[in-house]
Image (cartoon, grey):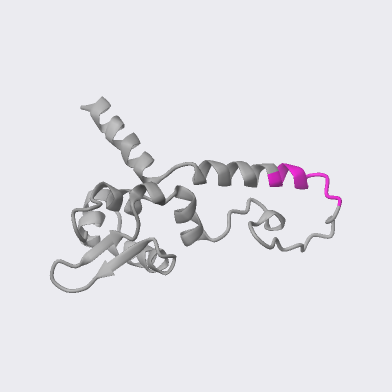
Amino acid sequence: MRLMVDLARHYGEGAVSLHAVATREQLPEAYLEQLVANLRKAGLVQGKRGAGGGYTLARDPDAITAGDIVRALEGPIEPQICTAEGEAVVNCALQPGCATHHVWMTLQSTIAKALDGMSLKDLTRKTATREIAHA
């Protein structure tokens, strides 16, 4: 998520190297290389090779949600396997009729709604506000 927020902060400024992100965010560059492969596959970032190369967001920061990022990196949002987005896997002997299924479905829906309601643009505003408050 921090990689994507960093790219959003620099949106429109050209490609950003993973080395620069790793330095600013205090994250291992090798770790970012692993993440960026899934983010590219999901169509969230674009890469540019060579001199001046690096990564940019594939869309405006307002058009990418925290939910998009979590799904690209972690897969469907699923607090329990029987509540996964899309085709949930029913592998529990208590299904159908599980007394706690409603709890997990409510949790899944709440998590998805929260993540899908936060854009990268929103997150960059929140960090900018926090940085100003600490200055």
**Residue drawn at point x = 21 percent, y = 73 percent:** 49
Would you place residue 107 above or below residue 21 in this image? above
In the rendered image, the quadrant that contains the C terminus is: top left
What is the x, y in percent for residue 28?
30, 59
Magenta region, residue range:
97-105
Would you place residue 125 above or below residue 37 in this image? above
What is the x, y in percent for residue 63?
40, 50
Near-viewer residue (124 or 78): 124
What is the x, y in percent for residue 106?
68, 42
Question: For the image shown, how many numbered marks are present on the structure?
Answer: 0
Q: In the picture provided, is 62 more to the left or to the right than 29? A: right
What is the x, y in percent for residue 64?
41, 52
Of all residues, the one furthest to the left in this rendering is 51
**Residue drawn at point x = 35 percent, y = 64 percent:** 36
Near-viewer residue (110 or 23): 110
Near-viewer residue (57 or 73): 57
**Residue drawn at point x = 51 percent, y = 46 percent:** 116
**Residue drawn at point x = 23 percent, y = 65 percent:** 54
Q: In the picture provided, is 15 more to the left or to the right than 78? A: left
Q: In the picture provided, is 46 more to the left or to the right than 135? A: right
User: Is 13 inside the magenta-drawn segment?
Assistant: no
Would you place residue 86 above or below residue 25 in this image? below
